[in-house]
Image (tube, rainbow, N blue to C red):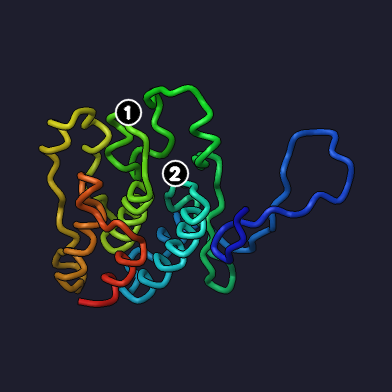
Amino acid sequence: RIDNAHVLKPCGQQRKRNYLYIVTEYIEGQTLAQWMRDNPQPDLETVRDIIGQVANGLQALHRQEMLHQDLRPANVMLDSQGVAKIIDLGAVRVAGVAESAPAQTLEHPPGTVQYMAPEYFLGEPGSQTSDLFSLGVIAYQMLSNRLPYGANIARAGSRAAQRRLNYQSVLDAKRSIPSWIDATLRKAVHIDPLKRYQELSEFTWDLRNP
């Protein structure tokens, strides 16, 4: 259902299938996680470009009523031309399919704790703003090599505990980052999903416009 330059493409089946498997395009490149290790201080424009590409891929999923739920640097590839692609769709929640399953709270959050939106730790279903939260964390980490709430968010399993979490400014003496970028990231990774950006396009716009 997804045909987007920034989402991994499956390959058509050409022969009789005897086992359960899928074949996808081959991407010559490296994960964003490896790229971040090799480029610990990328310039702001490069960060904007990569985050914008990943946002484009997420929008393609959201238009088909899908949530990625496990967006993290290891699940994004950068090919030899610098094109970013979301590669791992194993945790994707598909509307219609999800509703057909028995109603239950999430005993096991679907993603990777460092990048997961806090509502998952309350056993709540995610939303498009949950994916946006993960993208905001990635942008924050690319600019600072840190996480906006440190390692505390995974231990905050109640609303009261989450209200005590403090956002740590992305600004520091080592990098020249405009203060309005910090305000943009603060909104993208807000603990309350209703206080985040409600659209990915709003987030990527504000990353470029004071």
Residue drawn at (49%, 32%) of the image? 99
Mark 2 surroundings within 10 Å by alpha-carbon count, few (fewer than 14), some (14 through 19), many (20 or more): many
Give coordinates of residue 80: x percent, y percent. Answer: 59, 70
Residue that sits furthest to the right in the current view: 16
Residue drawn at (21%, 32%) of the image? 156
Q: Nearer the viewer, mark 1 or mark 2?
A: 1
Mark 1 surroundings within 10 Å by alpha-carbon count, few (fewer than 14), some (14 through 19), many (20 or more): some
Residue ID for mark 2: 70
Q: Secondary structure at mark 1?
A: loop
Q: Secondary structure at mark 2?
A: loop
Quadrant housing residue 202: bottom left
Give coordinates of residue 20: x percent, y percent. Answer: 75, 34
Left or right: residue 111 versus residue 153 is right
Residue ID for mark 1: 123
Residue drawn at (33%, 68%) of the image? 204
Among numbered discs 1 and 2, the one appearing first in the sequence: 2
Give coordinates of residue 173: x percent, y percent. Answer: 14, 67
**Frontmost residue, 94 versus 52:** 94
Mark 1 and mark 2 in contact? Answer it, CB < 8 Å: no
Q: Amino acid at mark 1?
A: Gly
Give coordinates of residue 177: x percent, y percent. Answer: 20, 71
**Frontmost residue, 48 versus 2:** 2
Left or right: residue 80 versus residue 198 is right
Which quadrant, please, contains the C terminus?
bottom left
Would you place residue 201 above or below residue 19 in this image?
A: below
Q: Amino acid at mark 2?
A: Asp
CA gap, disc 1 and disc 2 = 15 Å
Residue drawn at (49%, 49%) of the image? 65
**Frontmost residue, 62 versus 31:** 62
Would you place residue 150 above or below residue 46 in this image?
A: above
